[in-house]
Image (tube, rainbow, N blue to C red):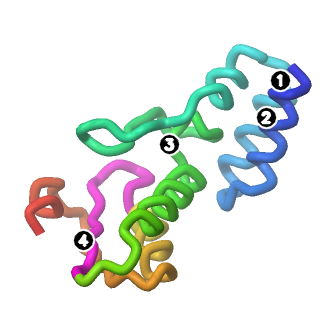
């Protein structure tokens, strides 16, 4: 349990979102080991539809920290690309923030971004 709490506290320290930091701190404080393990002992992975998961705090949930870290890895993988990356978002509650985080990381890595500023159908983003 101590290792689990240590990993959770490390995650909390590096989480850019105050809401998910507080959420994970609440789980740690509750002593609910199963809930904490479900968040800390899994890592979201890419599938055929990208990264999917329950929105919440920790590496086993979908959140800004996961999006930023994943995008950083993608940017490193892409390296010097000669085409822009298209970024859009749908109507789900955190989608716009996630898209803004993705765009920020890519631009910081020197990758040109075409950003849809309004809710956009996923097939249109994929087509673009």
Q: Marks 1 and 4: in contact by CB < 8 Å?
A: no
Q: Residue 121's x, y, as percent? A: 15, 57
Marks 1 & 2, CB-CB < 8 Å contact: yes
| Residue 108 at x, y percent in the picture | 51, 82
Instruction: Name the residue: 63% across, 22% down.
Output: 38
Name the secondary structure under disc 1: helix
**Residue denoted by label 1:** 30
| Residue that lies at the very extreme toward the top in this rendered image | 34
34 magenta-colored: no
The tag earlier along the polypeptide, 2 or 4, is 2
Q: Nearer the viewer, residue 12 or 45?
A: 45
Instruction: Look at the image and give the residue range highlighted in magenta.
Output: 83-96
Q: Relative to residue 76, is residue 114 depicted above or below?
A: below
Which residue is labeled 3 in the image?
Answer: 62
Disc sitting over residue 86 in the figure: 4
At horizontal 83% and vertical 23% (from top left) the residue drawn is: 30
Q: Nearer the viewer, residue 95 or 1?
A: 1
- Mark 2 highlights which residue? 26
Q: Nearer the viewer, mark 2 or mark 4?
A: 4
The residue shown at (43%, 68%) is: 75
Q: Is residue 46 left or right of residue 39?
A: left
Say whether disc 2 or disc 3 marks the residue closer to the N-terminus: 2
């Amino acid at each position: 349990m101590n290792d689990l709490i240590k990993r959770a506290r490390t995650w909390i320290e590096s989480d850019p979102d105050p809401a998910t930091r507080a959420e994970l701190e609440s789980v740690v404080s509750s002593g609910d080991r199963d809930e904490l393990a479900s968040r800390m002992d899994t890592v979201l992975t890419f599938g055929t539809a990208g990264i999917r998961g329950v929105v919440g705090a920790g590496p086993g949930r979908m959140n800004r920290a996961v999006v930023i870290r994943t995008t950083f890895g993608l940017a490193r993988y892409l390296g010097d690309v000669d085409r822009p990356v298209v970024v859009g978002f749908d109507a789900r509650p955190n989608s716009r923030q996630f898209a803004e985080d993705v765009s920020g990381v890519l631009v910081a890595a020197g990758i040109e971004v075409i950003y849809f500023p309004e809710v956009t159908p996923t097939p249109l983003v994929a087509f673009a």
